[in-house]
Image (spheres, rainbow, N blue to C red):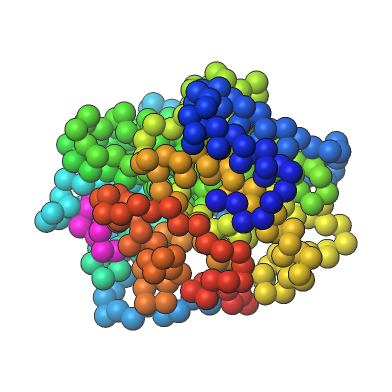
Amino acid sequence: MVRTGTANTASINWLFEMVRRGTANTASVNCAFIGVLIFITMVSRPIDAHTLFQYHGASVATKELPHVNSTNVVLLVNITLLNNAVSKGAVCLDGSPPAYHLHRGFGPGANNWLVHMEGGGWCYDTLSCSQRANSPLGSSLFMGETVEFPGILSDVPSQNPDFYSWNRVMVRYCDGSSFTGDVEEVDPTSNLHFRGQRIWQAVMEDLLAQGMDKAQRALLTGCSAGGVTTYIHCDRFSDLLPRRAKVKCMPDAGFFIDSKDISGANQQRFLVNQMITLHGSSKHLPAACTSRLTHPSLCFFPQYLLHWIRTPLLVVNSAYDPLQIRFILVPSAADPNNYWQNCKMNITECAPWQLKIMEEFTDYLINALAPVYYSKTGGLFINSCFAHCQTNIQALWHSPNSPRLSSKTIAEAAGDWFFRRSVVKYIDCPYPCDSTCNNNFT
């Protein structure tokens, strides 16, 4: 799995080898592995509160993607507002009802369900959450009547070969905590509601009543903050469905890592802890993780959750995810002279020394995926494209010019993994070796 060697990499690889050879029990190695990850991400200098940045995860560079040749009109799906959820306290940040979009399955997919959790970053304080409450990411009042269903949500076989006929759902994201918040009291000044966990429960209950309780196959997926939701709620999703059902999870661009930035600080850990505290999320993070780690907020990071997720996972992620580079590796506070400004926005503008730093960062990300790599049921599609979220963009999911690993598009690899047609453990070579990527930005 490792492309370049460092002292930290050697320590992690030693733990991997213990598991592979059977010379240590899994539980002890899990604890040791997490100990190593936490140790090497400890901050080397204190965080100045004045240097904190707001990371919403929704802003990415405009990407010039190849045109997808198709005579099919993009599918538009109507919104479903859960007005009855309001009485249960399951509401968006502004108190409006939660929502989802459902396109019914047909033919061979009529009893199969794909649930996609919308992404859009997080809010960490009253100011950032108040701003979200006046947008579709915090209020259903600002959501349109319809949304497009491209990529993994498409109903066109040539665009979505394995899941086109399934019941396909997009769950709207309006809580700012990856569906984990649960604070009973409403802020009297801002009138903010932190109820993400209740939204999750209300939406799942409604989908079960819509027929998901009879699912034969089901896939939970999501992009960015929705990818984090997928990691956190994966086992809960599986537990909701019939025991005979084949249930799996596929997070996309959600493997946000607990790592130091170029200055040696770990601002992302600070912000995650702040968000968890504000939203009251710690009690709804997976107990298998929080019961073992000293700081429950660490269980918001997927790298620590992986050891206890029982449901099969396919991790789709770019090793060079631009949002992770911009907000975790090189946040603005760590680059006061803007040496990284052009590189962060366009990887083709990076100098060799910057690419070297990025490669070390991506090596750490790939090493953290070891539990999935060594899992018999796990899958990986880790490319080196400068892309954030790839399953819900048609040109990246499945098209003539889509990124490929082992000659497979993401859609083809996902189908192979779900239906066990082949082992999918694809890890790309370092940038810029992959000629299938489309890394032109404006």
The residue lying toward the viewer, choosing from 429 and 169, is 429
> Which residue is at a point 77% across and 71% down the rendered structure image?
351
Is 168 in the magenta? yes
Image height of 364 relative to 37, above or below? below
Residue 145 percent coordinates (x, y) = 36, 57
Residue 65 percent coordinates (x, y) = 49, 76
Whether residue 126 is visible here, answered yes or no, is no
Quadrant where the C terminus sits is bottom right
> Which residue is at a point 15% across and 50% down the rendered structure image?
110
Whether residue 25 is visible here, answered yes or no, is yes
Residue 362 percent coordinates (x, y) = 63, 54
Q: What span is colored magenta in the figure?
A: 160-169
Magenta stretch, main secondary structure, is loop
The quadrant holding residue 73 is: bottom left
The quadrant holding residue 192 is: top right
Image height of 369 relative to 358, above or below? above
